[in-house]
Amino acid sequence: MLNQVYRLVAARQFEVQTVAEEVTANDIVVRPRYLSVCHADQRYFTGSRPQATLRQKLPMALIHEGVGEVVNDPKGEFKPGTLVAMIPNTPSETDPIIKENYLPTSKFRSSGFDGFMQEFVVLRRDRVIEVPADFDHEMSAFIEMVSVGVHGLTALADTMDADKTTIGIWGDGNLGYITATLVKQLFPESQLMIFGRHQSKLDYFSFADKTYLVDDIPADLKVSQAVECTGGRGSEQAIAQIIQHIKPMGTAILMGVSEDPVGIDTRSVLAEGLTLRGTSRSGRVDFEKALDILTKSPVTRERLQNLVGLTRKVSTIQDIIDFFEGDLTNYWGKAVMEWDV
């Protein structure tokens, strides 16, 4: 099968390349419909990754968050037109201990492996999961990010001590909002506190029990457990504040990605017996759990629909460039494009 792949070849420059795809009986052909941009995509688009990384990974199709319609299933398990979430992590082996998203041999779309900006995407059967027909399509585009939040909170539940009184989330952006929404489902008895830099963004967290600006946190405030969702340059300050405000023996889940190393006050970590656990990406089990939560909780779906920000139909390469440029100035929410190339 000949396929048109829209690859980034240099900063802000896309080209259409024709690729011959082999479709086996264990594959499913999907036509992408709604795609969501994340910060990792933007770092490639703007050329802000290290040049050695860009030389190694480009040309490459971007986007690892999206839903599409089944075009062909050789086994007939999915009917044509069925809306499915596409799972970007593609493991080539299994391990009894290491999860699929941490196996060094796994490939991840839009990170050295073509993402979803294609005319058709050929996915292994276990990399596709059906999305209920009544889900909002633009919200469904970032189910992958919801699965990342599920993965992080699952790690928190597996690691933390018995104190669930208060969960604090540092970060008022997309990841912080999604994770906070999930906390209300996975830890319904816990008090939820959000710590952010922008009051206008904190206002969106109306379902939280408390919100605080990071430069105005009461000195005596304590949280039982914490999740860091800032990433970038804000990671260091966020981790420092978590160490300052978390109770002894508490667990902090680190989810924000930073290009540069950050300093950590290990003396306090040791003195208070804290656990810092990093999480990244997700696997099929996280997608299944995310879809289960969304299916059972219309309130969660409604809250996540509030996260839909910039939306636009794209049909040409120039449309794609304009969309990415527009997302750079998008103040709130996820940028979702209706893929119509």
Image (tube, rainbow, N blue to C red):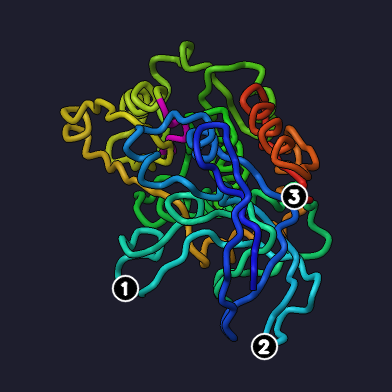
Q: Which residue carries the number 2 mark?
A: 75
Residue 172 spot, x, y in % from top left: 56, 28
Image quadrant in which you'd find residue 175:
top right
Residue 158 spot, x, y in % from top left: 38, 57
Q: What is the spatial separation of the Cα atoms under label 3 and label 1, in whole angstroms?
A: 36 Å
Quarter of the image where the N terminus is located: bottom right
Q: Which of marks 1 and 2 is nearer the N terminus?
A: 2
**Callout 1: helix, strand or loop?**
loop
| Residue range (magenta) | 226-232
Q: Which residue is drawn at 81% across and 70% down?
A: 81
Q: Which of marks 3 and 2 is nearer the N terminus?
A: 2
Q: Which of marks 3 and 1 is nearer the N terminus?
A: 1
Q: Which is in the foreground here, disc 3 or disc 1?
A: 3
Residue 41 spot, x, y in % from top left: 53, 40
**Callout 3: helix, strand or loop?**
strand
Q: Residue at x 65, y 44 (%)?
A: 36
Asked if marks 1 and 2 touch (Cβ < 8 Å), the reply is no
Disc ID at residue 304: none
- Horizontal side, residue 192 vs residue 226: left or right: right
Q: Which residue carries the number 1 mark?
A: 95
* Residue that protrudes farthest toward the right in the picture: 134
Q: Which residue carries the number 3 mark?
A: 339
Residue 72 spot, x, y in % from top left: 72, 77
Q: What residue type is labelled 2?
A: Lys
